Amino acid sequence: MKIAVLPGDGIGPEIIAEAVRVLRALDEHFELEFAEVGGAAYDRHGHPLPEATLKLAREADAVLFGAVGDWKYDQLARALRPEQAILGLRKSLGLFANLRPAILYPELAAASTLKPEVVAGLDILIVRELTGDIYFGTPRGRRAAPDGAFAGQPEAFDTMRYARGEIERIARVAFEAARRRNRKVTSVDKANVLETFQFWKDVVTEVHAGYADVRLEHMYVDNAAMQLVRLPTSFDVIVTGNMFGDILSDEAAMLTGSIGMLPSASLNERGQGLYEPSHGSAPDIAGKGVANPLATILSAAMMLRYSLDRAPQADRIEAAVRKVLAQGLRTADIAAGGTAVGTKQMGDAVVAALG
Ligand code: IPM
Ligand code: MG
């Protein structure tokens, strides 16, 4: 089994180092091959996603990804910015299904900014479409406004679009996932305003005909944003487009108190996947050894389960994470003002708890 390891920028290398230590402690034979990505790759090779990195990712059974981005690259042309690396990997590998669980660990209820009784028992799975929508829709660019009150002025535009097959396959992922959970899917759209999302709603409804055992509800995205803080435990699986999923998954992550706890998986039709923490590169704390490595360690667990056919090892890692939380270990982001351990100490504790 070959794993491409792409640490990236900011806290990426520190959190990836801990996940790698956990993988190595499993006594399995994994071939880990490292490559540069994001700003780190731009600095050395002049491109955020060098050909060699892309080739490695394509050939690997799975990709373990840290994070990309730093303010110092904000002035670069869009095509050279670190974010293009993750977007390029998603598109080139066809990683259309992004699974972002938002789970409240009972030990961390106090870390949530919401009242404990509102978030108790929270367990949501966001299924975000990842290779379409306004993120990748063409045409896009700048031009002279062709019409309207500002005709002739410079304008910028993007294109929101979804093809039937794109909606069908992500809807199936959501319904299948709901079957293994609480059998409810909330499809989030903006059908009251956007053609694209009226079509989305129609197609999701059609696909649902094959899943009579799963409940389907439709919700406008603004209402969904509100319900997520009002009654978050009313959700089971949320399925939505790329843009709305980007926004709602950050919101859902924060309900749990720390985005530093949440892993994610991005899968293609062949089960190949890219696994990354749901949080970003946090350049403000990079290199300080204080970042929470648990989201990355849990991403490695998802990788074992979804791409490497090693579910028992995934269970082992998840149990070890629960154990260290129960022991009271906290990195600064989840310490709620109490004593915090560093990135490496947290990694040490997980390795020790593997048993
Ligand atoms: C995410 C991130 C990315 C996105 C950025 C870094 C391009 O916010 O994975 O949610 O917008 O998809
Ligand atoms: Mg995001």
Image (spheres, grey):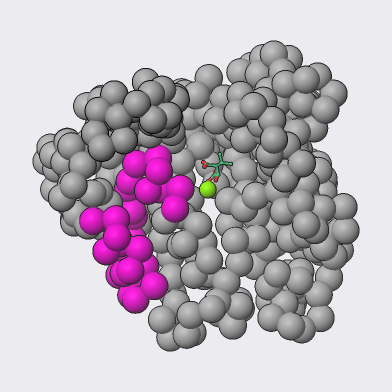
The front one of 204 and 225 is 225
The front one of 246 and 129 is 246
Above or below — where is 233 with respect to 320?
below
Magenta span includes 168: no
Above or below — where is 47 with respect to 192?
above
The residue at the point 41 percent across, 61 percent down is: 124
Q: Main secondary structure of the magenta part?
A: helix
Residue 140 seen in the current view: no
Q: Which residues are magenta?
A: 220-247
Choose top left, top right, bottom left or bottom right for residue 183. Answer: bottom left
| Residue 327 horizontal side relative to residue 167, left or right | right
Give coordinates of residue 101: x percent, y percent: 48, 55
Q: Quadrant of the N terminus?
A: top right
The residue at the point 77 percent across, 26 percent down is: 42
The residue at the point 59 percent across, 61 percent down is: 259
Magenta span includes 242: yes
Residue 209 seen in the current view: yes
